[in-house]
């Protein structure tokens, strides 16, 4: 009798496991797996220069059925999957960081930790979900940088407090580009902006190839004469300063941002708004789309897509231009 009971239990376990394996394979083939694949293009349509074929992402051992079986029999997740399972358990926005900054970050397969090549670890998600707009700006974690999805291409909607890219986890940028003016400045290199027509020297960081990308943007823009009036007198790149009226560092501190001509076509929310602070802003932009598109193709986001708009501002944020 005892024997029979055991046999029935084992049969039941086996059958259920097989069903689970089947179901997990079926689910796996339909969804979820696309996040394992590196993006082949940036959203604005250009080839993604940040991913080299065959070099970036690890091939991982990935069999949905095996861990399902393990879970079912032992009622817990196998530990090797939690720690060494590649991208599978990593939030998609953490994966975007790993893909965007391969020179600095390693994929150690951890769920909530960003790991740098030198072993530095940063928590991705602090678990606080109730941050209001000001708190998101002033006390973000890495995950909050993706709180508002930057809309690549032309279809962006102007809406209150929608500022994709304005949320920056400062320790991440300090670690990447330098913690103070001295550290950033010793790395800066010159870019010749529109060398055949303007030939202005702009100092930017070479980290992540930002200098080369800005040079490529310059070369592309120089070939389009009707755009020169917007870009032939850029207002600045590197400048260690706080964002006016805040305690936060400007992205210009890290040598990753450029302001194109301030006059006469730039618009800034603080110049244009009427009424209460941050309320009822009236959108205005006179920067041609062609310029934005070229910057986005090279990993730069545009401040003209913010509710608190700054239409002369571009900054290197490839993680926001990688498709989800
Ligand atoms: Zn700027």
Image (cartoon, rainbow, N blue to C red):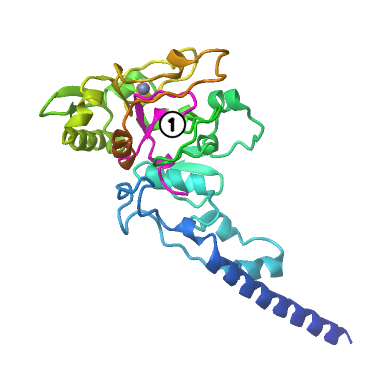
Query: As displayed, is residue 55 above or below residue 140?
Result: below
Label 1 sits on a secondary structure element that is helix
Which residue does the image show at 75% across and 82% down from the upper left? 11
Q: Is residue 66 something one can see in this rendering?
A: no
Residues shaded magenta: 298-324
User: Could you say which is closer to the camera, residue 76 or residue 100?
Assistant: 100
Residue 35 is situated, as x and y percent measured from the top left of the image, at 48, 56
Which residue does the image show at 57% across and 28% down from the upper left? 136
* Mark 1, other Cα within 10 Å: few <14 / some 14–19 / many ≥20: many
Which residue does the image show at 46% across and 62% down from the upper left? 60
Which residue does the image show at 16% across and 29% down from the upper left? 194
24 displayed left or right of 11: left
Residue 190 is situated, as x and y percent measured from the top left of the image, at 19, 26
Residue 7 is situated, as x and y percent measured from the top left of the image, at 79, 84
Q: Is residue 320 magenta?
A: yes
Q: Kindly indicate the quadrant of the structure image that contains residue 72.
A: bottom right
User: Could you say which is closer to the camera, residue 60 or residue 39?
Assistant: 39
Query: As displayed, is residue 61 above or below residue 12?
Result: above
Q: Is residue 150 something one can see in this rendering?
A: yes
282 displayed left or right of 256: right
| Ligand 1 located in image quadrant | top left
Question: Going by the picture, which residue comes out furthest to the right?
Answer: 1
Q: Kindly indicate the quadrant of the structure image that contains residue 227.
A: top left
Does mark 1's beta carbon lie closer than 8 Å to ligand 1? no
Quadrant containing the N terminus in the rendered view: bottom right
Q: Is residue 106 magenta?
A: no
Question: Going by the picture, which residue comes out furthest to the left?
Answer: 196
User: Could you say which is closer to the camera, residue 150 or residue 145?
Assistant: 150
Residue 46 is situated, as x and y percent measured from the top left of the image, at 30, 48
């Amino acid at each position: 009798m005892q024997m029979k009971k055991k046999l029935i239990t084992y049969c039941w376990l086996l059958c259920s496991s097989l069903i689970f394996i089947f179901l997990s394979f079926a689910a796996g083939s339909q969804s979820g797996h696309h996040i394992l694949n590196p993006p082949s293009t940036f959203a604005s349509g250009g080839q993604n220069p940040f991913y080299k074929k065959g070099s970036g992402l690890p091939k991982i051992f990935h069999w949905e059925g095996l861990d399902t079986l393990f879970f079912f029999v032992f009622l817990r997740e196998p530990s090797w999957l939690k720690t060494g399972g590649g991208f599978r358990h990593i939030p998609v926005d953490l994966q975007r960081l790993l893909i965007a900054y391969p020179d600095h970050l390693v994929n150690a397969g951890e769920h909530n930790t960003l790991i740098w090549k030198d072993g530095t670890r940063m928590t991705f998600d602090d678990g606080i979900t109730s941050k209001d707009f000001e708190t998101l700006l002033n006390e973000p974690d890495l995950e909050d940088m993706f709180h508002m999805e930057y809309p690549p291409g032309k279809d962006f909607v102007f809406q209150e407090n929608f500022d994709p890219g304005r949320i920056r986890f400062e320790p991440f940028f300090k670690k990447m580009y330098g913690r103070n003016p001295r550290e950033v400045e010793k790395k800066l290199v010159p870019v010749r902006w529109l060398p055949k027509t303007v030939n202005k020297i702009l100092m930017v960081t070479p980290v992540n190839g930002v200098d080369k990308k800005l040079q490529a943007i310059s070369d592309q823009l120089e070939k389009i004469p009707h755009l020169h009036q917007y870009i032939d007198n850029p207002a600045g790149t590197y400048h260690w300063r706080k964002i006016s009226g805040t305690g936060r560092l400007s992205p210009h501190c890290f040598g990753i941002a450029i302001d194109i001509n301030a006059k006469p076509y730039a618009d800034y929310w603080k110049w244009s708004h009427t009424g209460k602070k941050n309320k009822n802003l009236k959108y205005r932009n006179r920067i041609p789309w062609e310029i934005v598109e070229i910057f986005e193709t090279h990993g730069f986001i545009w401040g003209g897509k913010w509710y608190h708009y700054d239409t002369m501002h571009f900054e290197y944020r490839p993680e926001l231009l990688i498709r989800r």
